[in-house]
């Protein structure tokens, strides 16, 4: 055992020490890290000084990376890095009414990254470059704990069910014109409502802000069920809020947790985090 693992919440999330990403580490150490990821769903590695290329190289050990789509949140520059930021390169704070900031507020809605893609993300890695003195946490909800706590009736109701996910659903909650017509025209994708981890067979509820409809259920009923599931899953006992320190990299399992960003005093304090997103290995249905 080369890594030190400390639980951050009784049900999930752990801090892992003993790896300096920039210095490199053995395959054995990575195997331990990967096992910790499968086990705890959210992994915090503190004190990592990384540039984008180092973050990309590290992220690729988990699998092939997703390519970002060009959108207002990344200045229409697609690549492997998605920037969560409220400051320009010159250091000036971007006003909250700027389109890029409005776009990023969609992250405050509980979601799982890329569930609007047919092959959704395995995990995301978010690295803190500049953090505000208070607020701006990223909050996670364990969808395994939420699934385990469902009553038998609800578990039977969602077993084998497929929900429809679309990126426009969360963006439309923020502003009606955030989604380009091309993106809106894309058909929703189908995802299993319950996913099983291939390593440990733990089941997790798979839902979030992009999910709108359920196959074989009328829309009103589906919407009510999805809202109930989200309320259930995001109860305080299933959530962990990560208070960022510069240099933290947090890796979360998009198959097993939902997440959302929390507000901070964004007209005064800067917050810059860079995300890489590892692709999943196939469709969920
Ligand atoms: C993300 C995300 C929330 C935050 O990077 O995918 O949703 O706290 N971020 O910035
Ligand atoms: Mn996200």
Image (tube, rainbow, N blue to C red):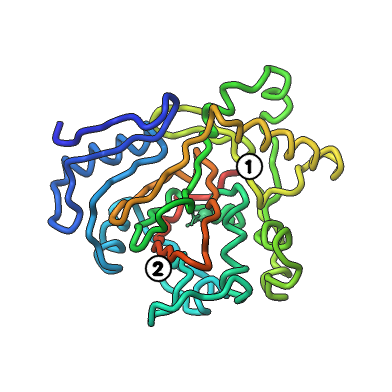
Q: Residues within 10 Å of mark 2 (few under 14, many from 20)?
A: many
Please indicate whether residue 139 sits to the left or right of residue 166 in the image. left
- The image shows residue 41 at horizontal and vertical percentages of 41, 37
Q: How many labels sit on residues?
A: 2
| Residue picked out by circle 1 | 207
Q: For the C terminus, which image quadrant?
A: top right
On the rendered structure, is 269 left or right of 174? left
Name the image quarter holding the N terminus: top left
**Image height of 162 relative to 69, above or below:** above
- Asked if 58 appears above or below 180 in the picture, the reply is above
Residue drawn at the location 67% of the way across and 70% of the way down: 183
Q: Residue furthest top?
A: 152
**Residue indicated by mark 2:** 80
**Residue at 50% in and 38% down:** 256
Instruction: Give the residue at the far bottom of this rendering.
Output: 90
Indicate whether 71 appears above or below 42. Answer: below
Residue 131 vertical position relative to residue 217 in the rendered view, above or below: below
Please state the horizontal and vertical placement of residue 110, each as a whole percent of the image. 60, 47
Q: Residue at x 45, y 66 (%)?
A: 82
Q: CA distance from mark 2 to mark 1?
A: 25 Å
Q: Is residue 60 left or right of residue 239?
A: left
Please, what secondary structure does the residue beneath circle 1 have?
loop
Front one among 132 and 164: 132
Residue 64: mark: none
Residue sitting at x 51%, y 78%: 75
Q: Position of residue 246 (x, y in %)?
A: 31, 56
């Amino acid at each position: 055992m080369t890594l030190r693992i400390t639980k951050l919440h009784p049900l999930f999330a752990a801090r892992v020490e003993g790896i300096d990403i920039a210095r490199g580490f053995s395959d054995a150490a990575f195997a331990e890290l990967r096992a910790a990821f499968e086990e705890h769903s959210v992994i915090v590695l503190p004190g990592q000084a990384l540039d984008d290329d180092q973050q990309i190289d590290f992220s690729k050990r988990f699998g092939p990376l997703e390519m970002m789509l060009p959108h207002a949140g990344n200045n229409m520059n697609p690549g492997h890095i998605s920037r969560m930021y409220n400051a320009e390169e010159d250091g000036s704070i971007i006003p909250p009414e700027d389109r890029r900031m409005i776009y990023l507020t969609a992250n405050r809605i509980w979601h799982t990254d890329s569930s609007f893609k047919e092959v959704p993300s395995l995990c995301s890695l978010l690295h803190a470059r500049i953090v505000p003195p208070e607020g701006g946490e990223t909050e996670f909800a364990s969808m395994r704990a939420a699934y385990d706590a469902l009553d038998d009736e609800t578990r039977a109701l969602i077993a084998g069910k497929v929900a429809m996910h679309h990126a426009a659903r969360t963006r439309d909650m923020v502003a009606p014109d955030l989604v380009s017509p091309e993106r809106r025209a894309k058909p929703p994708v189908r995802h299993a409502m319950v996913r099983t981890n291939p390593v440990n067979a733990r089941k997790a509820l798979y839902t979030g802000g992009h999910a709108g409809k359920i196959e074989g259920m009328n829309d009103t009923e589906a919407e009510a069920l999805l809202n109930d599931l989200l309320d259930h899953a995001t109860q305080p006992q299933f959530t962990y809020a990560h208070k960022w320190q510069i240099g933290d990299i947090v890796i979360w399992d998009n198959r097993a947790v939902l997440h959302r960003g929390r507000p901070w005093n964004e007209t005064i304090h800067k917050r810059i985090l860079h995300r890489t997103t590892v692709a999943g290995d196939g469709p969920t249905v």
